Image: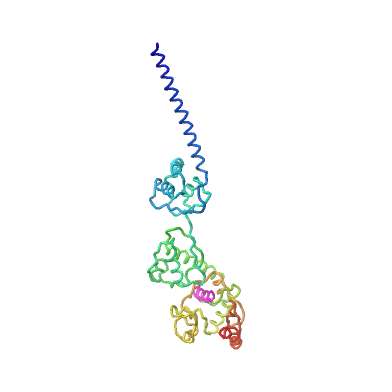
C-alpha cells in the first residue's frame, strides 16, 4: 500500500510539474506573441532618415542580419518571423531604400516588398552646354558611368541618335533615378523629352515663323536662352533674331561667339574675338550657327516659335538683367554708349 501511495504522489508531482511547465510555456508563448504583435507596429528607433541597400541576390537571413547590425531594427527574429508568416520572404526587392523616422517593422517589410526604392534627383539646368551636362553626370554618385571617356559621337550612338549633334538635344529638367541607373539612361530620358517638347511646340508655332525645320527653331531657342533670363524678354529677343534673319543681317549675338571660342574664351569678348572666323561667330557669318549653343527650356522654345511682333533689330544689356530694344542703328549706338561704355569707365 505504501508503494502505491508513493507512486500516486510521484505521479501527481509529475503531473503538477508538467502542468506548471505547460502553463509557464503558455504564458511565455502568449507574451512572445504579444511582443511580436506589438513589435510589428512599434516605430523603429530612428532619429533621422537612414539608407539601406538590398543587393541583388541578398536573402532574408543576410537582410535581417544587416538591418540589425546597422541598428535599424532591434531584433532580427521578429523581422524574419514576420517575413516568413506573411510570405514576403521571397518578395523583397533589391535597391536602395530611404527609411524615415516613425517607420514600423510592418511598414519596412511592405516597403521592401513594394520596391519603394530611394529616388535621387538629377537636374539638368537651362542654358547648360553638353559639356556641362556630362561633367555633372560624371560627378553624380548614384549613377553608373557609361559615358565617361566616350566621344560625343559614341554617346549619341548609345543614346539612340547616332546622326545628331548633342548640343541642345537634351531637355533641362529634374529627373529622378534609382541608384545604379546609368548616365546614358538619364540622357535618353532627357533626349526623348526634348523631342516631345519640340514636336509639341512646333505643331503649335506662330504662323509668322519662317524656320525651315524644328531644329532651326531649337538653335534660335538656345540663343534666346543664353541672351536673357527674363521671361518677358524672350519673345522680344526671338523677334529681333527673326527679323534680322529675314533681312539677311548678321545676328551679332555674343553667346554664339563665346560658344565658338570654347576654352579660348578669356572671360571678356575682345576685338580679335569678334573677327575670328568660327562657324559660331555670328558677327562674321550670316544666318544661324550650325547647332544650338546650349539647352533651351520650354519657355525659350515657345518664344522662338512665337516671336514678338515689332520693328526692333537691336538690343543691348542695361547691366541689371534687362535689355534696351531699338529699331535703328543710331538708336542702338546711343544705347550702347549709355549702358555699355559707361560701365567700363
Residue extending furthest toward the top: 1
Task: Specify whether residue 268 is painted magenta.
Answer: no
Image position of 286 with respect to 12: above or below = below
Q: Which residues are magenta?
A: 212-226
Q: Quadrant of the C terminus?
A: bottom right
Spot occupied by residue 163 in the image (x, y as percentages of width and height): 41, 71
- The quarter holding residue 329 reads bottom right
Q: Give the total number of marks visible in the rendering.
A: 0
Image position of 331 with respect to 56: above or below = below
- Which residue is at a point 43% across and 66% down the rendered structure image? 139
Spot occupied by residue 326 in the image (x, y as percentages of width and height): 61, 83
Spot occupied by residue 41 in the image (x, y as percentages of width and height): 52, 43
Q: Quadrant of the N terminus?
A: top left
Residue extending furthest toward the bottom: 330
> What kind of secondary structure does the magenta stretch mostly adopt?
helix
Task: Specify whether residue 222 is painted magenta.
Answer: yes
Given residues 73 and 173, the one toward you in this image is 73
The scheme the figure's colours follow is rainbow
Image position of 70 with respect to 332: above or below = above
- Which residue is at a point 47% across and 28% down the rendered structure image? 23
Spot occupied by residue 27 in the image (x, y as percentages of width and height): 49, 32
Image position of 236 with respect to 4: above or below = below
Amino acid at each position: 500500500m505504501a508503494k502505491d501511495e508513493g507512486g500516486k504522489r510521484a505521479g501527481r508531482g509529475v503531473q503538477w510539474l508538467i502542468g506548471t511547465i505547460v502553463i509557464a510555456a503558455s504564458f511565455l508563448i502568449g507574451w512572445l506573441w504579444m511582443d511580436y504583435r506589438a513589435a510589428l507596429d512599434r516605430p523603429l528607433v530612428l532619429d533621422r532618415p537612414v539608407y539601406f541597400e538590398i543587393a541583388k541576390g541578398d536573402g532574408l537571413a543576410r537582410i535581417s542580419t544587416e538591418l540589425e547590425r546597422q541598428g535599424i531594427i532591434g531584433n532580427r527574429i521578429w523581422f524574419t518571423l514576420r517575413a516568413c508568416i506573411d510570405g514576403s520572404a521571397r518578395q523583397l526587392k533589391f535597391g536602395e531604400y530611404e527609411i524615415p523616422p516613425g517607420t514600423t517593422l510592418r511598414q519596412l517589410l511592405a516597403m521592401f516588398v513594394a520596391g519603394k526604392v530611394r529616388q535621387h534627383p538629377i537636374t539638368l539646368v537651362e542654358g547648360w552646354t553638353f559639356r556641362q551636362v556630362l561633367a555633372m553626370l560624371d560627378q553624380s554618385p548614384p549613377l553608373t558611368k557609361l559615358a565617361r571617356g566616350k566621344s560625343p559621337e559614341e554617346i549619341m550612338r548609345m543614346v539612340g541618335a547616332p546622326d545628331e549633334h548633342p548640343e541642345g538635344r537634351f531637355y533641362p529638367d529634374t529627373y529622378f533615378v534609382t541608384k545604379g541607373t546609368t548616365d546614358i539612361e538619364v540622357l535618353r530620358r532627357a533626349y526623348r523629352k526634348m523631342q516631345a517638347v519640340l514636336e509639341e511646340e512646333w505643331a503649335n508655332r506662330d504662323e509668322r515663323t519662317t524656320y525651315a525645320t524644328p531644329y532651326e527653331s531649337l538653335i534660335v531657342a538656345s540663343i534666346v536662352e543664353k541672351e536673357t533670363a527674363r521671361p518677358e524678354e524672350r519673345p522680344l529677343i526671338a523677334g529681333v533674331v527673326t527679323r534680322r534673319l529675314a533681312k539677311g543681317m548678321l545676328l551679332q549675338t555674343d553667346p554664339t561667339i563665346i560658344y565658338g571660342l570654347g576654352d579660348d574664351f578669356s572671360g571678356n569678348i575682345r576685338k580679335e574675338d569678334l573677327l575670328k572666323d568660327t562657324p559660331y561667330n555670328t558677327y562674321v557669318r550670316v544666318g544661324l550657327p550650325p547647332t544650338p549653343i546650349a539647352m533651351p527650356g520650354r519657355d525659350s522654345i515657345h518664344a522662338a516659335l512665337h516671336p514678338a511682333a515689332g520693328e526692333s533689330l537691336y538690343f543691348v544689356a542695361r547691366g541689371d538683367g534687362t535689355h534696351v530694344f531699338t529699331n535703328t542703328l543710331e538708336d542702338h549706338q546711343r544705347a550702347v554708349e549709355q549702358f555699355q561704355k559707361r560701365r567700363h569707365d
